[in-house]
Image (spheres, helix red, strand yellow):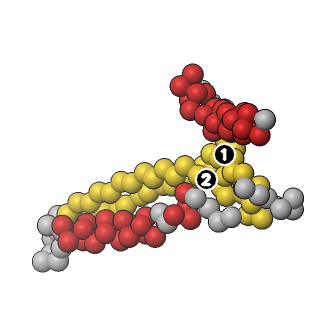
Amino acid sequence: MSETKISEMVEAAIQKIKEMTTTDTVVGQPIKLPNGATAVPVCKVCFGFGSGGADLPAKGSGELFGGGIGSGVTITPVAFLVERGSKVELLQLNTIGTTADRIVGAVPEVMDKVSDMVAGFKSK
């Protein structure tokens, strides 16, 4: 049996996946924009992986092995963190689906408005 060959193939594939899954894959490099702001892309990364192999009957004393490994990667940008001076915003690219998603998405904006209101009351 060729468990060693399958193990070597799987290990090689996993090593390549590890090389691709750096923090730069999910949170990209900052991009300086012409207006002075800085945008940082945020991506969703999905991996799929499969492997298989078999020992084949041989007429001679040699061992015959057939096997293969396949994988796929999807990298989808989902948002940008945008820094303008001392303000940081999360700009989502896809539409928010459920009510709970809308509430979670609105929290940063609501907090900014509450902070501005409190600051306005303190200055008066």
- Quadrant in which residue 29 is drawn: bottom right
| Residue 92 visible from this viewpoint | yes
The residue at the far right in this view is: 35
The residue at the far front in this view is: 124
Compared to residue 124, the image places residue 98 above or below, namely: above
Q: Which mark is residue 42?
A: 2
The reply, left or right, for residue 16 in relation to residue 114 is: left
**Of the pair 88 and 44, the residue shown nearer to us:** 88
Compared to residue 11, the image places residue 115 above or below, namely: above
Dividing the image into 4 quarters, which one contains the C terminus?
Answer: top right
Compared to residue 95, the image places residue 57 above or below, namely: below
Residue at left 83%, top 62%?
36
Dividing the image into 4 quarters, which one contains the N terminus?
Answer: bottom left
Q: How far apart are marks 1 and 2 (CA)?
A: 10 Å
* Percent coordinates x, y for residue 99 in the rendering: 57, 22
- The residue beneath circle 1 is 90
**Of the pair 69 and 24, the residue shown nearer to us:** 24
Q: Which amino acid does label 1 sit on?
A: Leu
Residue at left 23%, top 60%?
54
| Residue 93 visible from this viewpoint | no
- Quadrant in which residue 85 is drawn: bottom right
The disc, 1 or 2, on the residue closer to the chain's N-terminal end is 2
- Quadrant in which residue 94 is drawn: top right
The reply, left or right, for residue 4 in relation to residue 67 is: left
* Percent coordinates x, y for residue 48 in the rendering: 43, 51
**CB atoms at circles 1 and 2 under 8 Å apart?**
yes
Q: What residue type is labelled 2?
A: Val
Residue at left 39%, top 54%?
49
Disc 2 element: strand
